Amino acid sequence: MVRLIVLLLLSTSCNRLPLPSRPPGSMTGREFYQLAHSMRWDHREPIVQQQFLAGNVPPFLRKFKPVHTSITDSTGRKIRAVFYVTPDYLSIGNAKNWARVPLTPGTAQAIADSLHCFLPTRKMVNDIYTQATVKLEPVPLYAFRDSAITFWHHHLIIEGQRAGKKGLIAGIKKDVVSSGKISGRNVVIYGWHQLNGKPIQPLYGGHINWYVDYSHGIRLVSRRIKVNGRLTDYREVLSHPVYRKLLCDEDSVRNYSLQTTIDNDRLQPLSCCFNQVKY
């Protein structure tokens, strides 16, 4: 009976973000940007984190979408997996008035950790794009890239493109990703796929860890991965010498909070992590 309850809980965690109901009277997306338009990132992001974890999230974002992937091992056996992702990038607000909010990697990781999630790898971003039902042309902007006003403007541009289309969306942001390029002092980004399937942004870790601009997006992925029909934690998958290729095409993977590197079948300490960086 206990085993059945555990399995049911794990299955539920794959389907929905574990968030409380949206509190009545919570700020809308527009109200957030009216409040935050002149704030520095370190004043703006605690508000986003508090609002999101309190449940101020549009309903469509709460339910994960499955993404299927597979590899063939050295014996010719096909190994299949399913990982579960939010259908859009991190947003706050209600069903009719919501907004996407770019974040620094530290805040994004803190939110992901609180919700038993992680940030996707480069390979996962590619798989998400391939299986997305809504693919939009990237729209680069060039002035005041790190301004909240530009964040809001870019959100409105995307909504004009989306024109009410529903489903797993991709091509609208660069993903903040888990990667072996994470040093503890940087943010690593990748993606923003064009309609021809080629990403504008290669895997890049050249920005300091407090840098965030309008083009960055936070996609949450459930920690529970289904491999050959069995639910397991993503770290077990990434630590497996064969299964790790289901999720990653780098030699190692780091995140922005754990002081470890997942490198094949062993864990290695990081020399520093995001929480230790001073700036």
Image (cartoon, helix red, strand yellow):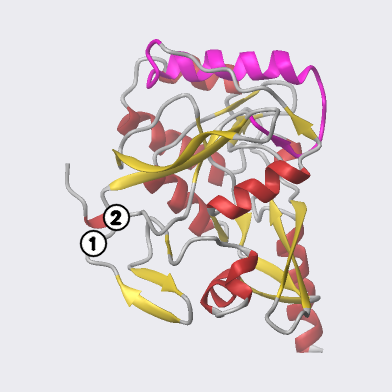
The reply, left or right, for residue 68 in relation to residue 250 is: right
The answer to whether the residues at label 2 and label 1 have Cβ atoms under 8 Å apart is: yes
Packing grade of label 1 (10 A; few <14, some 14-19, many >=20) is some
Residue beneath disc 2: 183
For mark 2, give the secondary structure.
loop
Residue beneath disc 1: 272
Of callouts 2 and 1, which one flags the residue occurring earlier in the amino acid sequence?
2
Answer above or below: position of 54 versus 112: above
Residue range in magenta is 143-171
- Name the quadrant of the C terminus: top left
**Of circles 2 and 1, which is in front?**
2
Amino acid type shown at disc 2: Ser
Q: Position of residue 19 (x, y in %)?
A: 64, 51
- Name the quadrant of the N terminus: bottom right
Q: Which residue lies at the image location 59% right of the left edge and 49% below the top edge?
A: 220
Answer above or below: position of 278 versus 152: below
- Using the rendered view, name the quadrant where residue 226 is placed: bottom right
Is residue 86 shown to the viewer in this render?
no
Q: Position of residue 237 (x, y in %)?
A: 60, 74
- Using the rendered view, name the quadrant where residue 247 is placed: bottom right
Q: Position of residue 200 (x, y in %)?
A: 53, 30
Amino acid type shown at disc 1: Cys
State the residue in front, 262 or 78.
78
Question: Is residue 155 shown in magenta?
Answer: yes
Question: Is residue 158 shown in magenta?
Answer: yes
Packing grade of label 2 (10 A; few <14, some 14-19, many >=20) is many
The reply, left or right, for residue 267 in relation to residue 235 is: left
